[in-house]
């Protein structure tokens, strides 16, 4: 189980440092600093999770995406890191050195990255920067709700990733009904399961599962049973699930009905998942 990490600032999701597309964040699940790429400046997402904390009011400055600007911002951020200059920033100045170690470049942001029409280009550019030999090696981490993993442009980008890069796919429920309550999406659960299976059959996949209360009702045992059943079916179809991340909300959600589960509640869920699936499970 991981110890709790501070966020960059109370209630602050990302620190863009004046950038348009590249931000820095201390990620509890990554265990330190992630440099993130805002793949969807228009904040497009096909989920409307009850726990989402993204303000979807359009931001006039960041509606379009410029690969050239993103690339320049990423190099500047990598340079700042190489020169140990994160400590100069108010949101990072009090953090221990360990948390300022670079854990990866994340493809995420305030929308769903696999819905980005520039997905393959962005991945290609980051890999070009990684292969340039100018920077210490870094891992790429795709954080996704899984709905666009089958899209041809996304597949093209995924094929560029190495096996040490990571793909974290959201799975918050074992049934479509529950998924509709939590993720509020018209996308069928079967699409996400099929995408996880297809991905996991050719490379490792990390499942990220957020559990929360809804209108003060905690998840029932039967719901956890069905969630575990989905994990077993994914695994039994040959998907390589390298880790299951179990966590709850950490920042104020957009829907007041959604509440945080305690660490002991999360640990109970994790223990069940671990013992009934044999998978590697971490609580955050
Ligand atoms: S998938 Fe992510 S960005 Fe989309 S609504 Fe859910 S939490 Fe928000």
Image (cartoon, grey):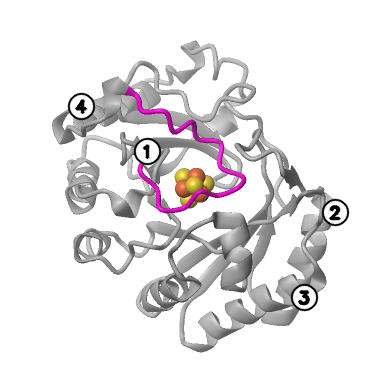
Task: Report the mark closest to the observer, 4 or 3.
Answer: 3
Q: Which mark sits nearer the N-terminus, 1 or 4?
A: 1
Residue carrying label 2? 264
Q: CA distance from mark 2 to mark 4?
A: 44 Å
Residue carrying label 3? 222
Q: Which mark sits nearer the N-terminus, 4 or 3?
A: 4
Q: What is the quadrant of residue 43 in the picture?
A: top left
Q: Label 2, secondary structure: give it.
A: helix
Q: Position of residue 141 (x, y in %)?
A: 40, 51
Q: Label 4, secondary structure: give it.
A: helix
Task: Report the mark closest to the observer, 2 or 3.
Answer: 3
Residue carrying label 4? 72
Q: Which residues are magenta?
A: 44-59
Q: CA distance from mark 1 to mark 4?
A: 21 Å
**In this image, 219 relative to 179: left or right?**
right
Judge: label 1 CB < 8 Å from ligand 1.
yes
Q: Residue, x 26% and y 48% (percent of image)?
A: 116
Q: What is the quadrant of residue 80 in the picture?
A: top left
**In this image, 195 relative to 115: left or right?**
right
Q: Which mark sits nearer the N-terminus, 1 or 3?
A: 1
Q: Label 1, secondary structure: give it.
A: loop
The answer to whether the residues at label 2 and label 4 have Cβ atoms under 8 Å apart is no
**Residue 197 makes an appearance in the image:** yes
Rendered image: mark on residue 27: none
Residue carrying label 1? 43
């Amino acid at each position: 189980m991981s110890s709790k990490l501070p966020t960059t600032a109370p209630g602050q999701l990302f620190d863009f440092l004046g950038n348009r597309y590249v931000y820095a964040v201390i990620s509890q699940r990554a265990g330190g600093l992630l440099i993130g790429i805002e793949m969807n400046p228009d904040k497009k997402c096909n989920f409307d999770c009850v726990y989402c904390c993204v303000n979807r009011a359009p931001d006039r400055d960041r509606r379009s995406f410029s690969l050239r600007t993103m690339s320049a911002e990423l190099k500047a951020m990598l340079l700042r890191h190489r020169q140990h200059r994160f400590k100069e920033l108010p949101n990072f100045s009090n953090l221990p050195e360990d948390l300022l170690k670079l854990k990866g470049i994340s493809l995420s942001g305030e929308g769903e990255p696999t819905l980005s029409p520039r997905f393959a280009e962005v991945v290609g550019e980051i890999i070009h920067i990684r292969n340039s030999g100018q920077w210490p090696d870094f891992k790429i981490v795709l954080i996704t709700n899984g709905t666009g993993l089958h899209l041809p442009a996304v597949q093209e980008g995924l094929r560029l990733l190495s096996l040490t890069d990571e793909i974290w796919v959201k799975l918050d429920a074992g049934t479509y009904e529950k998924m509709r309550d939590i993720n509020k999406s018209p996308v069928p659960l079967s699409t996400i399961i099929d995408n996880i299976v297809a991905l996991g059959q050719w490379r490792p996949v990390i499942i990220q599962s957020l559990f929360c209360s809804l209108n003060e009702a905690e998840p029932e045992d039967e719901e956890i049973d069905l969630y575990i059943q989905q994990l077993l079916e994914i695994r039994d179809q040959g998907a390589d699930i390298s880790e299951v991340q179990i966590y709850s909300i950490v920042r104020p959600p957009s829907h007041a009905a959604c509440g945080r589960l305690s660490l002991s509640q999360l640990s109970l869920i994790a223990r069940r998942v671990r013992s009934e699936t044999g998978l590697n499970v971490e609580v955050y």
